Image (spheres, rainbow, N blue to C red):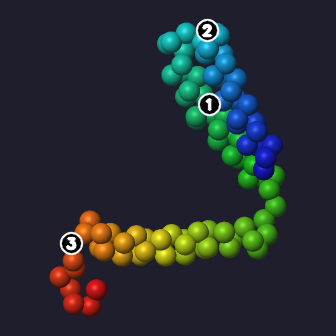
């Protein structure tokens, strides 16, 4: 996984350095951005997905993330009601 991440970081740093050294003109930047966004980045993602092994822990990560997000949403809703960011609910059961 870190090989793919490092490849993306190096690509960003090379692009930044090339821009600072004046290799790219101002009109070249949108073209280079589109090539990176629509060609290189999907290739990196596909390469990572094709080379990773699937195990049970990988499937539990989204479930845990969704459960934690729901807990945080309800906690933040309660804190907003306590701090008067949201008006009190007109329903007696809430």
| Sequence-first tag of 2 and 1 | 2
Is 41 displayed left or right of 57 in the figure? Answer: left
Q: Position of residue 4 (x, y in %)?
A: 76, 43
Q: Residues within 10 Å of mark 1 (few under 14, many from 20)?
A: some
Looking at the image, residue 20 lies above or below residue 35: above
Determine which quarter of the picture holds residue 42.
top right
Mark 2 vs mark 3, CA separation in Å: 55 Å
Q: How many marks?
A: 3
Determine which quarter of the picture holds residue 93.
bottom left
Which residue is painted at 29% across and 73% down in the image? 81
Q: Position of residue 33 (x, y in %)?
A: 56, 27
Mark 1 vs mark 3, CA separation in Å: 46 Å
Q: Which mark is residue 88?
A: none
Determine which quarter of the picture holds residue 85.
bottom left
Closer to us: mark 2 or mark 3?
Answer: 3
Which residue is painted at 65% across and 38% down in the image? 41
Closer to us: mark 1 or mark 3?
Answer: 3
Q: Position of residue 17 (x, y in %)?
A: 67, 18
Which residue is painted at 25% across and 69% down in the image? 84
| Sequence-first tag of 2 and 3 | 2
Of residues 33 and 92, the one nearer the viewer is 92
Q: Which mark is residue 87?
A: 3
Is 74 displayed left or right of 87 in the figure? Answer: right
Dot 2 corresponds to which residue? 22
Q: Residues within 10 Å of mark 3 (few under 14, many from 20)?
A: few
Residue at disc 3, secondary structure: loop
Looking at the image, residue 15 lies above or below residue 73: above
Q: Quadrant of the C terminus?
A: bottom left
Q: Which mark is residue 36?
A: 1
| Sequence-first tag of 1 and 3 | 1
Looking at the image, residue 68 lies above or below residue 37: below
């Amino acid at each position: 996984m870190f090989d793919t991440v490092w490849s993306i970081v190096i690509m960003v740093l090379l692009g930044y350095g090339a821009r600072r050294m004046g290799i790219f003109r101002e009109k070249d930047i949108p073209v280079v951005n589109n090539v990176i966004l629509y060609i290189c980045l999907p290739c990196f993602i596909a390469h990572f997905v094709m080379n990773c092994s699937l195990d049970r822990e990988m499937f539990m990560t989204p479930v845990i993330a969704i459960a934690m997000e729901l807990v945080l949403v309800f906690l933040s809703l309660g804190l907003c009601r306590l701090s008067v960011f949201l008006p009190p609910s007109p329903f007696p059961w809430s």
